[in-house]
Image (cartoon, rainbow, N blue to C red):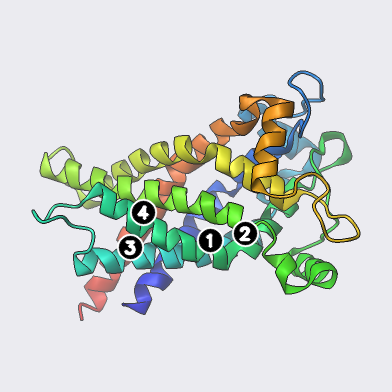
Amino acid sequence: MATSDFVLGGVAAMGAGVFTNPVEVIKTRIQLQGELAAKGSHAKPYKSVFQAFVTVAKNDGILGLQKGLAPALCFQFVINSFRLGIYTHALKKGWVHNNKGEISFTRGLFWGAAGGVVGAYCSSPFFMIKTQLQAQAAKQIAVGYQHSHSSMSDAIRQIYGKSGVFGLWRGSMANVGRATVASAVQIASYGKAKSLLTERDLVTQPTCLSFCSGLIAGSFMAVAITPLDVITTRLYNQGLDAQGRGLYYKGWLDCVLKILRSEGVHGLYKGFWPIYLRSAPYSTLVMLFFDELIALRERYNPD
């Protein structure tokens, strides 16, 4: 298994993450808005994606749109090093192809999910810190629990000081579920879309092919992961009591039931549009950067 596949997968995701992190900030705020409150019974500082961008820039400054960037990039590097590296290795070994030599959607789902499981668990602390930093806002537009971290390193110190190593992996199972679905759907649909576009001569230019395939993959991923993403955001951002237990939720199932009771099904789909607006370009950029980096490696190091 080529080590460079893991490294290039992580670098590609970091490149995409720089561009899409502002949308991730907006998504986090919208998902925490009106937490466990009935629709229409709470303040709503974020009314739409565009208005939320303006609100954050006005109250938190332009740099507020890049909150949590450091842990976000660390998260992207770790999770995508595994998921893209594992999938690429499976692709080279022929494990993703069926007996006819065609790319199998179901096998792609399996290997995408396998990489997602490993990557999500290893990167879980960075996702939690990213969420908590992105939730921090000026008092007049603050939503959800407000943590006091001043930076990624300060967050690690505070969490470790209060809860030890296990505290850094709190809520990790929710993230594993989220990332498993996201990785499986994104990678499998990307591989299948790329195969179909090529076979039918719809798109042949390599860069355009990567762009179109990534756009299709991101669209499917946004539909699939929104409820799981809401659950993960809520679990990671909640505060803890003196015994280290969550103030709002005992676990992912308790989180789902409380959201349904208090906010209805709508609550599980909060942040769908920013997820969609982020997922499509994010998937496109990750896959485009990854394919271009692989091509660059093959050009200068064909062995």
Residue 207, image x, y percentages = 27, 50
Amino acid type of the residue that numbered disc 1 sits on in the rendered structure: Ala
Res. 87 mark:
3
Q: Residue 166: x percent and y percent?
A: 71, 69
The local crowd at label 2, few if under 14, some if 14 to 19, many if 20 or more residues have their Cα within 10 Å, is many
- The answer to whether residue 56 is seen in the rendering is yes
Against 112, residue 264 (above or below) is: above
Residue at 84% x, 72% y is: 161
Q: Residue at x 40, y 36 (%)?
A: 219
> Which residue sits at x=79%, y=48%?
136
Observer-side mark, 2 or 3, equals 2
**Crowd band around label 4 with a 10 angstrom C-alpha radius: few (<14), some (14–19), many (20+):** many
Q: Secondary structure at mark 3?
A: helix
Which kind of residue does numbered mark 2 sit on?
Answer: Ser
Measure the alpha-carbon separation of dots 2 and 3. Answer: 22 Å
Q: Earlier in the sequence, mark 2 or mark 1?
A: 1
Pointers 2 and 1 in contact (C-beta within 8 Å):
yes
Q: Nearer the viewer, residue 115 or 303?
A: 115
Nearer to us: label 4 or label 2: 2
Left or right, 179 with respect to 245, comes to left
Q: CA distance from mark 4 to mark 2?
A: 25 Å
Residue 287, disc: 4
Q: Mark 4 or mark 1, which has the lower sequence index? A: 1
Q: Element type at marker 4? A: helix
Closer to the camera in the image, 103 or 303: 103
* Mark 2 lies on residue: 172
The numbered disc on residue 120 is 1
